[in-house]
Amino acid sequence: MWGDSLKVKSESQGLSMKVALIGAGNLATNLGKALCRAGHEVVQVWSRTTESASALSKVLKCSYTTDLKDVVRSADVFIIAVKDSVLPSVAEALKEGREEQLVVHTAGSMPMDILPFERSGVLYPMQTFSKNKEVDFSIIPCFIESSNESDSMLLKTLSRTVSDTVYELDGESRKYLHLAAVFCCNFANHCFSLGADLLKRHGNIPFSVMLPLIDETAAKLYSLSPREAQTGPAVRWDTNVMDKHLQLLADTPDVQKIYELFSKSIHNDQL
Amino acid sequence: MWGDSLKVKSESQGLSMKVALIGAGNLATNLGKALCRAGHEVVQVWSRTTESASALSKVLKCSYTTDLKDVVRSADVFIIAVKDSVLPSVAEALKEGREEQLVVHTAGSMPMDILPFERSGVLYPMQTFSKNKEVDFSIIPCFIESSNESDSMLLKTLSRTVSDTVYELDGESRKYLHLAAVFCCNFANHCFSLGADLLKRHGNIPFSVMLPLIDETAAKLYSLSPREAQTGPAVRWDTNVMDKHLQLLADTPDVQKIYELFSKSIHNDQL
């Protein structure tokens, strides 16, 4: 699967595509800005609310609509960047009059064939996007898939104008990639949140003291695998320390349960 | 507790202390190197094995011993950096003939009074140390505690020659600090490990594709709290995506359980 996939090297293309952007959330905003910077033309933005549509259209210097029927009829590519839960209905509403167009979505966890178009595809930029926190799009790995070879080339070409790292990846592998991203990003971040909560409740220690430790935990991964990099009481199976930690968590049984499961899982990982 | 503590600013001291280093593991090695670089004299290294003791003594250009009875009788400070589990017995064996000395340990999770000395203390550098991965000691927050004011000053002075961030922190708060560090470092790293495992088993995707996402997850914390920074299906309570993820984890019930607990915990965290 992965062995067959193509890593496309970034090189200046000097091409400009016309893109219709369906969505105005964090991902759509970051992607839209990156596309404009790379010289593409976002011809129109759609969002459910006038507020979001209008705000992003100002940034991207394009028109906007809140009615899917009023979206332009043709573009080089339609990019749907909306919440997974509304993706099917948005795609369905977009279909009429645009059956021949190339329409892609940006969702890591959704299959390509959720899109009811002859020419469909996926452009999944694997990153965590937050409001008010701009990201450098060029370092974001983008994973693409398409229903035919020529659109695959088009998506590769488009993606490599905004990202240095573009991979072709089938939907089955993408599902696991997305799940792995949930662990590496959302779940790791929740560990930070649980740590922050402990500091706040006991001694009111500022969370900023943790940043060097967190930075080093991430930096280690450039030279060690996560398994090799692991340290702490669970690796050593230091039951003395772990028992004390479990006692400290007695007032938060859910977190205590997490501590127990993680310690066991870390220990098993090292066997 | 925290409000009363003193953050000591780093400034060049031009002093040199004589340090006896009891231990030759990752922490002892990194601390020993930092102390030498700051102009202190590590007068002797003790380790249980000749191999470790000899290796570190070469690096630090000092004598070594594997017999606690042969450790020097006086130094400005004795630093015990050994595994938590052997700390009490090492300290006990060191006591005879050194009752008047200042002896500190480096363990985040251990109370100061585990040391049977009149003048005892703690110097806890909060970082994750791995073999073959040198760290910049100056950015490591160091947390100190001592049984009397003058030794407290001595430890502060010593610590701030190797670290830019030195805090005084009592043992009760340090227990929670250490527990928070387990979440922020060990448990977060285990999330990376679980992600790496998924990538390896499905599509053999190289873990390096995750590094930009992990870097950004850590970088966000400089401008957002972990709670504010949280993204993903559990925040949105997107049961469609979460159910599919749980199915993908059907062959690893322990990891599936972790997914379930974390998703609930993330969701509760946002309420």
Image (cartoon, coloured by chain):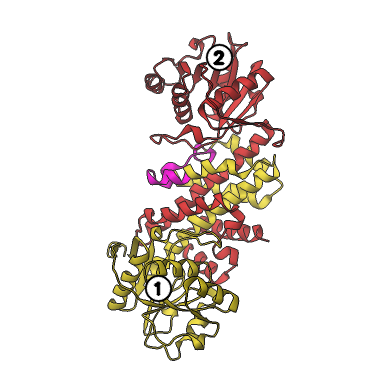
Chain colours: A red, B yellow
Q: Which image quarter: residue B174?
A: bottom left
Residue A240 in the image: x percent, y percent? Answer: 54, 72
Give how far apart the Cα atoms at labels 1 and 2 are. 65 Å
Q: Quadrant of the C terminus of chain A?
A: bottom right
Q: Which mark is residue A230?
A: none
SS under mark 1? strand
Q: Which residue is mark 1?
A: B122
In the rendering, at what x and y percent does residue A3 appear? 71, 37
Classify residue B89 as left or right of residue A168.
Answer: left
Q: Does any portion of residue B173 appear in the rendered image? A: yes
- Dots 1, 2 in contact, CB < 8 A: no
Kindly identify the residue that appears in the image at 49 percent across and 47 percent down. Answer: A189
Chain to which mark 2 belongs: A
Q: Is residue B221 magenta?
A: yes
| Residue toward you, A213 or B109 | A213
Residue B169 shows in the view: no
Q: Which residue is mark 2?
A: A76
Q: Which secondary structure dominates the residues rendered in magenta?
A: helix
Q: Chain of mark 1?
A: B
- Relative to A4, does residue B135 appear above or below in the rendering? below
Q: Quadrant of the N terminus of chain A?
A: top right
Count neighbours of disc 1 (C-alpha within 10 A) and say few if under 14, some if 14 to 19, many if 20 or more.
many
Residue range (magenta): B217-236
In terms of secondary structure, where does tag 2 sit? loop
Judged left or right of residue A210, residue A171 is right
Q: Residue at x 66, y 59 (%)?
A: A268
Which amino acid is tagged 2? Asp
B236 vs B24, nearest the viewer: B24
Say which amino acid is labelled 1: Val
Vertical relation: B267 (above or below) A238: above
Residue B15, position in %: x, y?
30, 72
